[in-house]
Amino acid sequence: PKVPHQYYLFHVYYEYPDGDLSFHASSLNYSLIDMTGNNGLGTVIEKNQLILADTLDHKITTVKHANGTDIWVVTHGWENTSFMAYLVTPTGIQTTPVISTIGTIHEFPRNVGCLKASPDGTKMAIGLGLYAAELYDFDDGTGFLSNVQVLRNTPLDRYYGVEFSPNGQFVYVSTWNGLLFQYDITNANPASTEQELFNDPAVLIGTLQLGIDGKIYAAIAFENYINVIENPNNAGLACNYIEQAIDLNGRESMIGLPPFIQSVFLVI
C-alpha cells in the first residue's frame, strides 16, 4: 500500500505425496516484486519469504481494510476451524494474524473450493468440496469473521466456485457436477432465496471470478471456452448466464481463474 511500483505476491506451498488426496498446503509465503526493475518488466527483490509454517487449507483471499489503505490477506488452517487474517500496511506485513475460530473443520473431503470476499468487504463466502457452501460476516476493520450461515449442503455436490455480485446483494455458488446457484444475502435467511441458474452434470464448473467490467466469469474444466454471468446484479435468471461466452481458440480451460481483489476494483 502507498508504494505503487511494488507488489506482494502471496501464495501457499503445496506438496502432493503419492496417494495423498488431502490437498493441503504446508506454508504461507510471500514474494516482493518491484516493477521499476528489469526495464519495467519487474524484479523479484524478496522471494518465497515464510509467513507461516503450518498445514493450511489451500484457500486464500484478500480484502481492503476499512481505512481504505491497508489490505487483509485471509487464509484457513488445516483440520481446524481457524481463519487467519494478516494485515498488510505501507510499512509491511504484520505476521501475527487475527484468528477467527468459527464454522466447519477444513479437512478431506471438505478442502476443495474457493474463498472470496464481497466487494464492500463485509461478507465472505467459501466452497467446501463434498460438504457445503457457507457465508460469513467479515469485519474489514478488525479482520474477524462471524455469523456463519450454510447456503447449501447437499453432500453429493462438490462446492467449488463462489463469487459476489458487484452490488453485494447476491452470492453465486458453483459445483463440479454442473450446478450454479444464486443467493440473496440481504435476506436474513439467504439459503431460502436459492435460485438454480444452471444444471448439467456433464459440465464441471470451477472458479467464479468477478471482473473489472462487472461480469462474473466461470471456468469450465476441460473445455475450450469460459462462461459468463452477464448481469450478476440482477435476480434469478435475469442475471443472464451465458454458456460458451468466450472462445479460448482451442486452448483448454481448467478449474481456476486468476483471483483479483474485488474490493480494490469495486465496480458499479
Image (cartoon, rainbow, N blue to C red):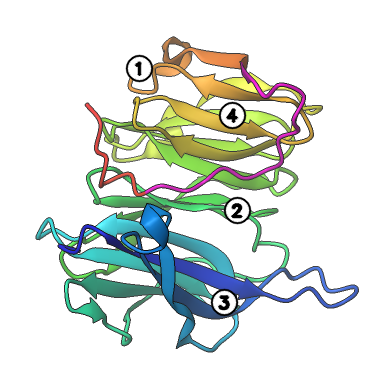
Between 89 and 184, which is closer to the camera in this rendering?
89
Residue 91 can be seen, yes or no? yes
Spatial CA distance of label 2 from label 4 is 14 Å
Q: Residue at x 31, y 87 (%)?
A: 96
Q: Are marks 3 and 4 in contact (CB under 8 Å)?
A: no
Spatial CA distance of label 3 from label 4 is 27 Å
Spatial CA distance of label 1 from label 3 is 36 Å
For disc 3, the neighbor class at 10 Å (few under 14, some 14 to 19, many from 20) is many
Residue receiving disc 3? 56
Residue receiving disc 1? 234
Residue receiving disc 4? 180
Spatial CA distance of label 2 from label 1 is 25 Å
Magenta stretch containing residue 249, yes or no? Answer: yes
Q: Dot 3: what SS?
A: strand
Q: Residue at x 28, y 35 (%)?
A: 168
Which of the 4 quarters of the picture holds residue 185? top left
Figure label count: 4
The magenta stretch is 246-260
Q: Amino acid at mark 2?
A: Gly
For disc 4, the neighbor class at 10 Å (few under 14, some 14 to 19, many from 20) is many
Q: Amino acid at mark 4?
A: Leu
Tag 4 or tag 2, which sits nearer the N-term?
A: 2
Residue 21 percent location from the top left of the image: 81, 68
Q: Main secondary structure of the magenta part?
A: loop
Q: Dot 2: what SS?
A: loop
Residue 139 percent location from the top left of the image: 21, 61
The label nearer to you, 1 versus 3, is 3
Residue receiving disc 2? 113
Q: Amino acid at mark 3?
A: Leu
